[in-house]
Image (cartoon, grey):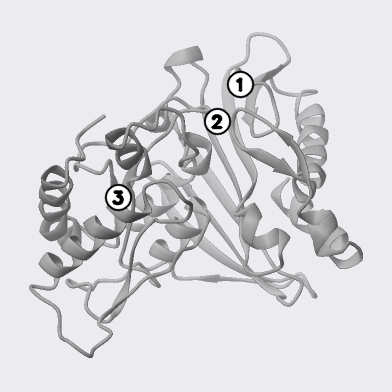
Amino acid sequence: MQHAVRDALRVSMARQDLEHQARQVRDDDGDTIFGIDIDAEAVLLGHCEAWARHESFVVVAEGLPPEGRTFGVNPRTRIIVDPIDGTRGLMFDKRSAWSLAAVAPERGADTHLSSVELAVMCELPTTRQTIVEDLFASRGGGATRRRIDTNTGASTELPLRPSAATTLRHGFATICNFFQGGKELTARIEEEFLRRALDGWVDGKAEVYTDQYISSGGQLAELALGRDRFVADIRPLVHEALGHADTLCCRPYDLCTVLVATEAGCVVTDPFGDPLDGPLDTTTNLGFVAYANQNLAKKLGPVLAEVLTANGVGRR
């Protein structure tokens, strides 16, 4: 299904201009739906109808009703999908997005992120890119990386190896600060966190780099692939501290492939170091922190929690 999304997008992006891809189609509970999303949604539903000849399941995805859509009777599984995670970057042909999907036993409202047994994420390239990555994992079975040449279809399995660094120095570490609303407080938290994480700041040196990749799946992929060492999305906590009741933040369908990162050896928690969890839906706001390895998590987790508390940002 994700490869079909990728193929459809490549054709669509080759023949359409940026204004067509970036046009706003509608606003859903999960997020704004842009023109580029419609192609992926049609592919998803077509595959669901084919699967329904053999399986019964609930599918939850951006663009569908909040409760999801049931295929068959007495569904055994729940499939949660973000057909395009990172739409804003891809629709302007700036950067890859990712197609995310995960499967969990169907338990109704009790089906949570922690229930996921299988996760698959496929890179959706820009028009200038021919090499892409597929990452997938099963609970307890480890994670796999496959590199694909989209021109020839040739694929190669490669190691999926997060960074073993024990410091953020000379690496990428990001606290998400994409959109207006909370930028000032988030930046203050980031400055204080990095100062403490590095035990000071060397004037005139660039020692830690930030990557504001507007794709939660993409952020986790960068971590699992060894390119980033730390990423935190604290938007729900910051917005709540500032009195913003309903804001656009990361949601469970954006994080449905977190299993890929954790099976690769990364550590992913909530912003205060507690287990990350939430219902498998498209509407619940979630904050998360991800570390490339256990050493970084053990060293930096308490620091982030203390900085958040000192700045009036508490647990939800």
List the residue tagged with mark 2: 282
Q: Which residue is mark 1?
A: 66
- Residue in view at x 40 percent, y 27 percent: 245
Per the model, the C-alpha gap separating discs 3 and 2 is 19 Å
- Residue 86, above or below 228: above
Q: Name the spot of residue 233 as percent of width and height, x first.
A: 36, 49
Q: Secondary structure at mark 3?
A: strand
The percent position of residue 242, horizontal first and vertical second, equals: 31, 37
- Kind of residue sitting beneath label 1: Pro
* Labels 1 and 2: the sequence-earlier one: 1
The quadrant of the image that shows the N terminus is: top right
Tags 1 and 2 touching, CB below 8 Å: yes
Viewer-side residue, 86 vs 135? 86
Q: Residue at x 83, y 62 (%)?
A: 13
Can residue 143 be seen? yes
3D distance between C-alphas at marks 1 and 3:
26 Å
Mark with earlier residue (3, 2): 2
Q: Is residue 287 above or below residue 163?
A: above
Q: Residue at x 25, y 71 (%)?
A: 164
- Of the residues shown, which amino acid type is indicated by label 3? Val
Res 46 quadrant in image = top right
Q: Percent position (x, y) of residue 175? A: 33, 58
The tally of labels here is 3
Q: Which residue is mark 3?
A: 289
